[in-house]
């Protein structure tokens, strides 16, 4: 579809295009804050899809121009919520959506918000609308926007406050260990892994129940040893600082029996906290893993393996 087939840009789209092109025609702080709030609150899937497009396309401007910390964090929170709540998609959509054509993405917003009108007017085909509103593609955009915003945030504001993720990982006051560790164990270069580990680190610094200490420590340690050059440098630095502060007492009767192999940490914790086990599950020594010496072994290993190289 050629760009001149799009409907005339209304105020919302025009204002977004102004931000994308770094010539805002409105107050970008107010606009982006409103978009983030709407994305977080609206139950309408078309509105949520269009607002992911809006925040993704403006996230690059926000990372380098937005200096309102509350609004900056609301953008991260909205993208994290979209990533957590978008449905899966198993369809094979024809065509490829270009993530770098920001103006094109913005101009799709009216068609996404009202696909029936756009289709009836001949402005877009159903396959094109399905592609641009595909949950899997929207989740990719949400994750990429988070990556961009998280990478630049420490430069201006320091490490972010991830308390907004508490509803995702705590139900009725109980930590959802499986949800946390699944995200922390995802690809380390992806925002869900970095956000989960930073959330776990933030929670470790508080007064948490004893049963949370092991899974929170495992999430932080596992993510730390798997970080690579694609992670914002502030992420591993912050995780190391937290582990230094919460280092567990290693004095115990188990000696060297504690599992210090990073590949076993998440699997071991998930075994302990899963509601049920299966025949092919590899059992773990519960007394050994719940001992403070296990957390101490993980922390020592994570700090050793992630130590910055001397120049």
Image: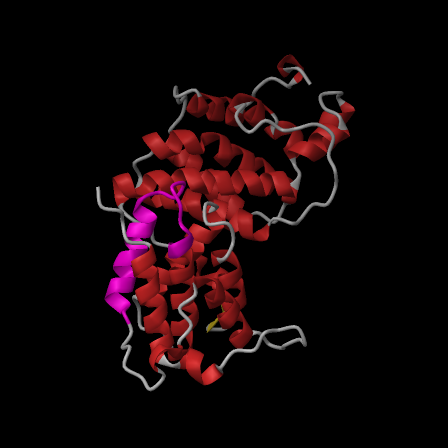
Query: Do we see residue 161 in this rendering?
Result: yes
Query: Do we see residue 114 in this rendering?
Result: no
Which residue: 39% across, 35% down? 30
Check the image and name the residue furthest to the front: 256
Which residue: 64% across, 18% down? 6
Q: In the shown orientation, is residue 37 left or right of residue 93?
A: left
Q: Position of residue 220 (x, y in %)?
A: 38, 61
Foreground of the two, 125 or 287:
287
Position above or below: 197 against 148? below
- The chief SS type of the magenta part is helix
Position above or below: 38 against 277? above
The magenta span reads 224-247
Check the image and name the residue furthest to the bottom: 253
Where is the C terminus found, in terms of image quarters? Answer: top left
Foreground of the two, 86 or 17:
86
Foreground of the two, 243 or 10:
243
Which residue: 52% across, 78% down? 284
Where is the N terminus found, in terms of image quarters? Answer: top right
Q: Position of residue 116 (x, y in %)?
A: 74, 32
Position above or below: 252 against 171? below
Image quadrant in which you'd find residue 300:
bottom left
Check the image and name the residue furthest to the left: 311
Q: In the shown orientation, is residue 304 left or right of residue 229?
A: left
Foreground of the two, 212 or 291:
291
Residue 52 highlighted magenta (yes or no): no
Q: Position of residue 259 (x, y in %)?
A: 42, 72
């Amino acid at each position: 579809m050629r760009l001149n087939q799009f409907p005339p840009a209304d105020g919302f789209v025009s204002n977004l295009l102004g931000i994308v092109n770094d010539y805002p025609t409105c107050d970008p702080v107010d606009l982006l804050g409103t978009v983030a709030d709407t994305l977080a609150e609206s139950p309408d899937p078309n509105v949520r899809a269009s607002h992911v497009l809006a925040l993704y396309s403006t996230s690059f401007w926000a990372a380098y121009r937005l200096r309102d910390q509350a609004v900056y964090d609301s953008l991260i929170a909205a993208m994290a919520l979209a990533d957590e709540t978008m449905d899966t998609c198993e369809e094979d959509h024809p065509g490829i959506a270009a993530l770098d054509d920001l103006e094109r993405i913005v101009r799709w917003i009216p068609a996404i918000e009202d696909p029936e009108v756009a289709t009836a007017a001949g402005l877009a085909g159903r396959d094109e609308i399905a592609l641009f509103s595909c949950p899997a593609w929207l989740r990719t955009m949400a994750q990429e926007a988070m990556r961009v915003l998280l990478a630049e945030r420490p430069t201006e504001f320091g490490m972010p406050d991830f308390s907004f993720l508490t509803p995702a990982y705590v139900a009725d006051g109980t930590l959802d260990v499986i949800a946390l560790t699944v995200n922390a164990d995802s690809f380390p270069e992806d925002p869900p892994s970095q956000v989960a580990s930073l959330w776990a680190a933030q929670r470790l610094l508080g007064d948490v129940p004893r049963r949370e200490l092991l899974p929170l420590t495992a999430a932080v340690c596992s993510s730390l040893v798997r970080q690579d050059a694609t992670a914002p440098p502030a992420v591993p630095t912050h995780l190391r600082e937290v582990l230094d502060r919460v280092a567990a007492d290693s004095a115990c009767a188990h000696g060297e029996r504690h599992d210090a192999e990073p590949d076993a940490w998440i699997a071991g914790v998930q075994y302990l906290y899963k509601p049920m086990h299966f025949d092919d599950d590899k059992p773990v020594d519960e007394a050994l893993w719940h001992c403070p010496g296990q957390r101490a072994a993980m922390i020592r290993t994570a700090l050793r393996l992630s130590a910055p190289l001397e120049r």
